[in-house]
Amino acid sequence: MPPQKPFDPDKPAKPKTKRRARVTATLPVAPKAPAPVEAPLRKTPPAGPTPVGLKPALTTPEVKPDSAKPITSVDVELFAKNFARIIEGGGKALAAYMKPREEGRIADQRSEEVTDVVKTLGHVIEYWMADPQRAFELQSKLGKSYLELWASTAKRLAGEEVTAVAAPDPRDKRFSDPEWSSNQFFDFLKQAYLLTARWASHMAEGADGLDAHTRHKAEFYVRQIANALSPSNFVLTNPELLRVTLESNAENLLQGMQNLAEDIEAGGGNLKIRQSDSSKFEVGKNLALSPGKIVFQNDLIQLIQYSPTTAKALKVPLLIVPPWINKYYVLDLTPDKSFIKWCVDQGLTVFCISWVNPDAKLAGKGFDDYMREGPLAAFDAIEQATGEKEVHALGYCVGGTLLSVTLAYMAASGMTSRVKSATLLTTQVDFTHAGDLKVFAADEEQISMVERQMAETGYLAGSKMASAFNLLRSNDLIWPYVIGNYLKGKAPFPFDMLFWNSDATRMPAANHSFYLRGCYLENRLSRGTMTIANKQLDLRKIKLPIYNLAAREDHIAPARSAYLGSSLFGGPVRFVLAGSGHMAGVVNHPDKKKYQHWTGGAPQGDNLDAWIARATEHPGSWWPDWVNWLRGHDGTEVEARTPGSGKLKAIEDAPGSYVKVQS
C-alpha cells in the first residue's frame, strides 16, 4: 500500500465535483415474454381490392422483447429547471388571457355555448335512460367491447398473434407513430379510446327519438369532445410526445408554453392558433401578385382589373365575386397556383371584387347593400372600363349565393340582362343539406346568441367564423397545431393556403343576420320566399347558362347541397364535381396534375350518388373544362384591354388597400 502524504493544514482541500443526476428512461413496454412465446409476425396479405361489404382483417404487430428504444438520458436537474420555467410561462399565458377581461375589453360568452352543448347532450342521455332495456343494451355494447379488448390484450401479452379489436381509419394521422401499435401499453390505450369514441358516436346517432337538428348537433358535439380527449393530445398518453419531452428535458413544453402565451396575446385574450408561419407571407409581396389596378371603389368593394398577358382577349369580360367571409386572394395565392393569373393567361379580361373588412361603422350594411354595392356596382364599372354591357360572372362560396340572389333580383326587376353566363363554385342556394355549419345557424337560439354578440360591436368578429370553420375539421385544423405548437414546441410550416385561412374578416351585423336567417334557418331562397329590396326572388326566372362546380369532400358547402341547388334554376346547368375539398378542389392548377373531376348529365333532385355512378371521371383540374365551356358561349376576341385605359382611371395598384386590413 503506497504511503499517504502527510496532512497539511495550510493547504485548502480540493473541492468535490458536483455531478448532475442523470437517468435513463424508456417508454412503458410489456414484460419480456418467455422464449417460446416469441411468434413471428403474420405476413401482410398481397395488395388487392377488398370485396364490397367486407372489411380487411386488421392485425396488431407483435412486440419484440427488446423493441423499446431507450431514450437519451434525462438530465433531472435541467428537467426540473425547465419545468419550473414552464410554470412561470403558464402564468404569463394566464395573464395574457385575463388582462383584457379584467380591463373589460372582452366579455366572455362561452356560458351560452356550453349551455347549448349540455342541453343537447342531456336530451340524448334522457332518450337512452327513458327505456331501461335500451339503456342496458347500450351499456352492454360498451362492456362487451372492453371485454374483447381485454381478452385480446391478454392473449398478446402471452405471445399470441391477435387481430385488433379497434383500428383507426387509414386516413387518421393521430396514431401514425409506430409505437401506437408496437407498444402494447399505447396500443391498448389507442383501442380503448377508439371503442369509447365510437360508442359515444353511436349513442348520439342512435337517439331516434330526437328531432333531426338536435341529433345533428349532438353528433357534432360528441365528435368534438371525442377529438379533444384523444390520447394523442396529451404528453403522458402519446408515445411520440413522451419521447420528445424526455429527450429534450422538457424544452419542447417550455417553448410550447411560450408559443401559447404569444398566441393568446396575438388573439387579444383569446387563443389564436397559428396554422402557418405568418412571418413568411405578406399580401402584395409574395401573395396576390397578379398585376393590375384598382379601377373603382365604394364603401364595400374595391374592383381590380388585371393586366393582360395576351395580345387578344375575349370580348366579354369576367367578373369574379369572391366570398366576403374570407379574402379574395385565395384565387391569387402564388403565380403557380393562381386561378386569376391562369384566367388572364387564357385571354380573359378579368375583374375581381375585393371586399372591405368592415368595422362598426358598416354595421347597418345588409345583404341588399352588398348586392347593390357589390355585383351591381361592378357591372356598371366594368361597362365604363370596357364598354361591354354583359359579363361572364363567377361567384365562389357565399359570393356565389350573392350572385344568384343578384341574378334573381335582376330577373324580378325586369332589368336588362347584364350577365351572359354564370359560374358558381362550391355554392349553396338550397340549404337543406348544408352540413355541419347548420349546427351553428339552424335554430332560433343559436342565431339569437350570435345576434346578441354582434349587437355589442356591430359585426361578427373574424375569429368567430374562423373557429367555426376550423371545428368542421378539428382533427386537421385544430389538434395537429395544438400538438405541434404547444406540446412539441415547434413553429408551424409556412403554408400559403393556411395563412389565407387565418386571415379572417369581420361581417356586418345586418348582413350576417340576414344570411343566417334567410338561408340557414328558413331556406327562403330555394323556397321562393326571399325578398331583397322589395323584390321577391324566384331562381326559376334565371334563364342564362350556369356552370355549377361542387367539391366532393367539401365540408362547408357539401356537394349534395350544391347538386340539389342545380335543379332550381330556370336555364341550362352544367354540373361538375371536383375532387378534394372546399379550397383545394377549387384552387387546383392544371399544371399540378392533382385530383380529378367528374362530368355528366343534367342534375336532377338530390341523388348525387346516382349522378356520380353515371358520370365520367377525368384526371386533373376542372379549369380547362370550364374555360372551354365559357368560350362556347361567346368566343369573340378583341384587343386586350389595359387597366385604366378606359373611362375608369387607376386608383392604386393591385391588390389594393382593402385586402390588407387585418381583423
Image (cartoon, rainbow, N blue to C red):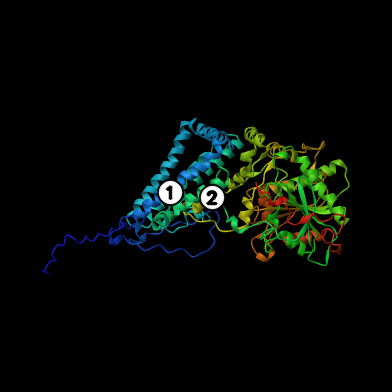
Q: Nearer the viewer, residue 279 or 325?
A: 279
Q: How many marks?
A: 2
Q: Nearer the viewer, residue 27 or 642?
A: 642
Q: Is residue 222 above or below residue 157?
A: above
What is the three-letter code of the residue carrying label 1?
Ile
The residue to which callout 1 is attached is: 86
Residue 518 visible, this angle? no
Residue 71 placement (x, y as % from top left):
37, 59
Q: Position of residue 243 (x, y in %)?
A: 40, 56
Who comes first in sequence, dot 1 or dot 2?
1
Outermost residue on the front side: it is 10
Name the one closer to the observer, 112 or 641: 641
Question: Which quadrant: the N terminus?
Answer: bottom left
Q: Amino acid at mark 2?
A: Asn
Name the residue carrying label 2: 475
Q: Nearer the viewer, residue 617 or 94?
A: 94
- Give the CA separation, mark 1 to mark 2: 26 Å
